[in-house]
Amino acid sequence: MTVFNEIIGFLTDPLMQRSIIAAVIVGLVAPVMGTYLVQRKLSLLGDGIGHVALTGVALGWIVGAAMGLVERDALAIPGAVITAIIGAVAIEFVRERGRTNGDIALALMFYAGIAGGVVLIGIAGGTNANLMGYLFGSISTVSQLDLLLIAGLGLVILLVGFGMRGLLFAVSHDEEFARASGLPVRAANMVIAVIAALTVTVAMRVVGLLLVSAIMILPVAVAQLVTMSFRRTMTVAMFTGVTVSLVGLSITYWYPLSPGATIVMVAVVAYTLVAITRSVIQKARPGSADPHPPTVAADSAMVKGV
């Protein structure tokens, strides 16, 4: 009876209801973009964008304070959206022009973004607690306005991620072949960059800017252990993302832990368990095929599976 009451309390608490909705949205949409980034071997792009988004959060604080808003961080998410998109487009532009390599561009985003964000939040009157909330997530502070923004941006990510899946996969899988086939590679790359930026800002409140890449990539890593096609990888990753988000959030309801870090640790545990289980099954069945053998046949299977 006590456990039942605890569960009812968990589900009926308005704060937890907003947190659950935010966690489900993030768990659903982050792996969609993560699947494209893993395919492009740009798994750490989300980290770079997240660091730039911190500067946008600080600028939102400064503008909100200048406008005399009661909640000075009311413009934090809009500020993060704008700067994250600018940063993502900039790194894609640098990567495409080839003036420097992608690693250097990512490093510039890491250092300039995090340093600028910390300095500007201090200028805006923010505290270390505010800073930590954005760096490591603060799902308990999700307001109704935040929830509307997260839901709206999440819908855009899903529409683009599914509606343009064929084009985005073709560009992510083999950019040169896509360009030779006459596909709009530049436009597709920009779409991926912008949607990655939106995904970072959607997940910002839940897992924090420093851990945002984890919720984008780890569910995809889990899915790749058990699937062969791109489509199935994305589907399993979305299911995994929602599951680890809800499990992690539930743990923090009963134990005083950081929600974002707990969600990420649950994802790490899920990956470890699936990897061990897969290894045991393969050893028990020596003839079973590796889901991802480094062969041309595997690449062909993925292309057909889109």
Image (tube, rainbow, N blue to C red):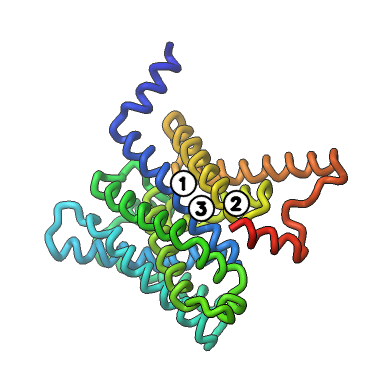
Q: Mark 2 = which residue? A: 233
**Can you see residue 150?**
yes
**At x 73% / y 52%, what residue is drawn?**
291
Three-letter code for the amino acid on which mark 1 is drawn: Gly
The local secondary structure at tag 3 comes to: helix
Viewer-closest of 274 and 262: 274
Q: Is residue 4 above or below residue 276?
A: above
**Type of amino acid at the residue the image marks with label 2:** Thr
Residue 196: quarter of image: bottom left
Query: Viewer-nearest of labels 3 and 2?
Result: 2
Name the mark nearer the viewer: 2 or 1. 2
Label 1 CA crowd tier, 10 Å (few <14, some 14–19, many 20+): many
Q: Are marks 1 and 3 in contact (CB under 8 Å)?
A: yes
Residue marked by disc 1: 27
- Give, as a three-letter code, the residue at label 3: Pro
- Cα–Cα gap, marks 1 and 3: 7 Å
Residue 100 location (% of width, % of height)? 54, 85
Split into 4 quadrants, where in the image is the C terminus? bottom right
Q: CA distance from mark 3 to mark 2?
A: 9 Å
Residues packed near mark 2 inside 10 Å, few (<14), some (14 to 19) or many (20 plus): many
Q: Sequence order check: which comes first, mark 3 or mark 2?
A: 3
Can you see residue 119? no
Secondary element under disc 2, as helix, strand or loop, is helix
> Which residue extends farthest top?
1
Vertical placement of 14 versus 229: above or below?
above
The residue located at (67%, 44%) in the rendering is 272
Q: Position of residue 250 (x, y in %)?
A: 45, 33
Where is mark 3, residue-wise? 31
